Image (cartoon, helix red, strand yellow):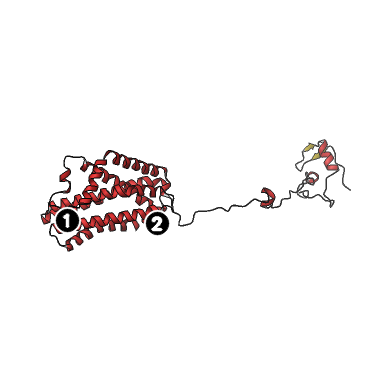
Amino acid sequence: MKQPISQSQVTPHGDTLPMTHADSMNAIAPITDTTGEAPFGFSGLNPFFAERDSLVVAPRYREATLEEVMGENATLIPEKFPPSNYRPNFTSDGLFQGLVLLLAALYAMLLYYNMADVRALFERIARNSTGGKHIFDEYRGSSFPQFMNTSGLIGLFFLGILTVKYSDVLLSDTLTEHLSTLAAMPLSVGITAVFCVMLLVEWLLLQLIGLITRESNFIGQLLQLRQLYFTLSNIVISPSLLLFVLCPPGRGEMWFFLIVIELAIMLLLYLREALGLFLAKKISILHWILYLCTVEIFPISLLWLLVTR
């Protein structure tokens, strides 16, 4: 038989602890489950808590379904992780979009304050004259040369933002994986600086050719012709380019095809007038093709190779 429990209990270390009324009640009438046994306890491990451990009820858990917790119409949304070939969307950066809007404002101001120069530019293209004088001689003393330089500088920044727009195609995987969207604006400015260096190298190369061939006058006309059509391309293509750059990824196909059509037209007009300039100076078409390959095509292809590798 179970020995009656006194008002004190002796611990294994020999100390005597008083027993409260609740403890004595629990010890006299332990609570059991329907089987008549204590559902959970460690009475066999600790003699002091033998009677009290029999009162501990084991927690019983079960997994609940989503419908039981959230309702019958609940739907579990799976976690979406970026794919392994994920590339950041540089055009979503706030600083980059601010740069685009700033260039748009500068472009609008350029047209507003130089509308007479814009008309003179289109009149010059319509005449398509390739005489012996420099192209800008007839505009000497006017604001037309300054308009050309300002428009060309804005056009170089437009080339930078267009390159960033196509960074997922132009830039290498190794480079884009280590770049965040915050690098969009510095990357655009850096690309503009690279284009400036490339144009400077082409200018030095043409000046060297002019000194060797003693055709400095012809080289000056050729340089002004390049600047003329670059400015024309900037004036014509910039609205479509701005709208295309601000489009979300995967959108803006209409603006892209419009840019391609406009660029093709500008290129054909430039090639036609450059060929006319070569023929007017009685320079063979072979030299014209050599000029296109060495001055126009080779630097761009070399830059493309360096960026994409």
Q: Secondary structure at mark 1?
A: helix
**Residue 172 quadrant:** bottom left
Say how many tags the image has: 2
**Residue 299 quadrant:** bottom left
Q: Residues under labels 2 and 1: Cα distance?
A: 43 Å
Residue that badge 2 annotates: 173
In the foreground, 178 or 53? 178
Residue that badge 1 annotates: 277
Residue 91 visible somewhere in the drawing: yes
Residue type marked 1: Leu
Name the N-terminal-most of marks 2 and 1. Answer: 2
Which residue extends farthest left?
Answer: 214
Which residue extends farthest right?
Answer: 1
Expressed as whole percent of the image width and height from the top left, the position of residue 301 reads 28, 58
> Could you classify mark 1 by the number of other residues whose Cα lies within 10 Å: few (under 14), some (14-19), or many (20 or more)?
many
In the foreground, 264 or 41? 264
Give the residue at x 31% y 54%: 263
Q: Secondary structure at mark 2?
A: helix
248 left or right of 63?
Answer: left
Q: Nearer the viewer, mark 2 or mark 1?
A: 1
In the foreground, 272 or 226? 272
- Tell me the number on the disc at residue 66: none
Residue 171 visible somewhere in the drawing: no
Expressed as whole percent of the image width and height from the top left, the position of residue 219 reads 15, 53
Expressed as whole percent of the image width and height from the top left, the position of residue 116 reads 24, 41
Give the residue at x 24% y 48%: 122
In the foreground, 31 or 263? 263
Mark 2 touching mark 1, by CB under 8 A?
Answer: no
Expressed as whole percent of the image width and height from the top left, the position of residue 279 reads 15, 59
Give the residue at x 33% y 48%: 238
